[in-house]
Image (spheres, helix red, strand yellow):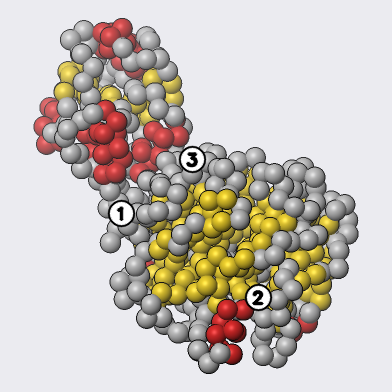
Amino acid sequence: MTSISKPKQALRSVANRFAERLGSACFVSITLLLTQPLVFAQHSHGSRATPCKDATLQCARSATPLFTQDGALWLAWAGGGAISIARSTDLGVTFEPSKEIAQHGAFLDTGPDARPQLVGDSTGHLVVAYGFFRDKNWNAQVNVSRSTDAGQSFSVPAPISQDPTSQRFPTLLTDPEGQIFASWIDKRIVAQANKSGKKQLGGSIAYAWSADSAKTFTQESIAQPHSCECCRVASALTPGGLPVILYRAIFEGSVRDHATQTFTSRALPGPTRRVAVDNWATDSCPHHGPALAVSPTGVQHVAWFTQGSTRTGSFYARSTDQGQTFSTPVAIGNSEAMPGRPYLLATSTGLWLTWKEFDGKRTAIFTQHSIDDGVLWSMPKLIAETVGYSDHPLLVQRDNVAYLSWLTAAQGYRLLKLDTPGPSLASYGPGDWKKILHAGAGKPQIVHFWGYTCGPCLEELPRWGDFLKESSALKAIFIEVDQVPHATASQALTLAGLAKADNRASTAVFDEYMRYEIDPKWLGELPITMLVNAKGEARRVRGVIDFAQLRAWLKAQ
């Protein structure tokens, strides 16, 4: 199985996509080179010597971020038996005095997948949802508290459901019209079955809507009657504003695999669609919920953990048909380092994936980025690390800029900006060919012209990356001529190991006028490599380069 964070990932799907778009009848196989993670180590300071029990952020076990329309960061956390919230205007460096929303002591739900949920709307209202245990039998209740004065005060928490059976793991979404969608794990169907003597494990997925900023909710409905009872639910909105939910369902034979439902209207969830046949047959509690993001194009992205007989580990898949089918699962992270707790974020400029790894001593957070809806991914990057307790990594955006939100015992709360990987591309325009020849006079150089929509070009790029590793002193210029977005070309170059090369992109349509000044006999075929000797004389090599002949040419210079 190919991992999105290891070498040897294929660019085959990209080549096929462009081949189909261009009407090509040939099959082009493209190999994508993923290099090892770039390491940016955060120094850890060791774990806390004594338990921390108060309700401050420093003692929190989980924290959930939200950026409001004014750019402020709100953080809701669970710690010291309380749910608290605070505001920051400097990206989490400092926080205003916190407000305690509720205190439940030891009965506050702080399990591995439990955390407060936080959403806002365009009017400045804030809504917090959380779970707590009502009794010593671990029957839980989901409470909701709301603020109608921009967070200055919060209402007394009230149950989201009047049903007396247990509810846990709420999720909240705010749709484009300001209505709030809530979903959670519900035990009423299981309780009814057990009372009738039909023993049933697990829980159900319930949902409800609110049109008044969570003051009231509609009568809840059941979307799926058979789900894992101890794994969080993930939810997101389609471009049309309808919910998608992802959860660990229970299939025949106590198999706990993940499934999605895409709502066809506010009141009607679509059919259950199995993400992958992992075949994890278990009656235990995985305590490891999934992640979900829906891009502006409507592509659904999912990530999850499994220990099934088919596959074990953390995986990613995508759906381009509203969740009807999903791509073949791709492994996340280093399988030897327990990759887990994946999280996804889709912005208008790209897709982000983050996860945890643990090597026995430290916990590390890695991220990857995609600019083509999950077809290609950047190489994994180490963002932060710690020793001791840490919360799950979360992703949040402000003005289409992605941030990692992470709470640790050793370093406290951290909000880290995620920079889009990849090199910048200099401009190449009419008349620049003579400038290239003049600048390189006196020694040989190579100028390679390629296009992102050219399958053979993409297939060859990683071989150029390998070649330059052995010829680091060689002057080589790579010019992309298809006028695709710079971020798209940049990612291809990075994945091919050419991030540090002299990369340029054509600023004008690469027509016969621009080709003529390079070689009057060039009709536009790609790839093309120009071998320029020390005298500035250029020799054109059409198509994929023979690197043995290239080495011979260099040796003769």
Q: Which residue is mark 2?
A: 167
Which quarter of the rendered picture does the N terminus lie within?
A: bottom left
Pick the front one: 350 or 357: 350
Rendering coords of residue 183 (x, y %) = 62, 64
Decide which of tag 2 and tag 1 comes sooner along the chain: 1
Query: In percent of the image, x 16 and y 23: which residue is there?
Result: 542
Pick the front one: 272 or 301: 272
- Is residue 395 something that shows in the picture? no
Vertical relation: 44 (above or below) 491: below
- Is residue 376 something that shows in the picture? yes
* Residues at circles 3 and 2 in contact by the CB criterion of under 8 Å: no
* Left or right placement of residue 144 versus residue 484 in this view: right
Secondary structure beneath dot 2 equals: strand
How far separated are the C-alphas under marks 3 and 2?
A: 33 Å
Q: Which residue is mark 3?
A: 297
Query: In percent of the image, x 41 and y 35: which residue is there?
Result: 488
Q: Please name the amino acid that badge 2 sits on.
A: Gln
**Could you classify mark 1 by the number of other residues whose Cα lies within 10 Å: few (under 14), some (14-19), or many (20 or more)?**
some
Rendering coords of residue 347 (x, y %) = 55, 43
Q: Please name the amino acid that badge 3 sits on.
A: Thr
Rendering coords of residue 262 (x, y %) = 50, 54
Vertical relation: 431 (above or below) 22: above
| Residue with the most extreme front position | 196
Decide which of tag 1 and tag 3 comes sooner along the chain: 1
Tag nearer the camera, 2 or 1: 2
Decide which of tag 3 and tag 2 comes sooner along the chain: 2
Vertical relation: 502 (above or below) 336: above
How far separated are the C-alphas under marks 1 and 3?
A: 28 Å
How far separated are the C-alphas under marks 2 and 1?
A: 43 Å
Q: Which residue is mark 1?
A: 7
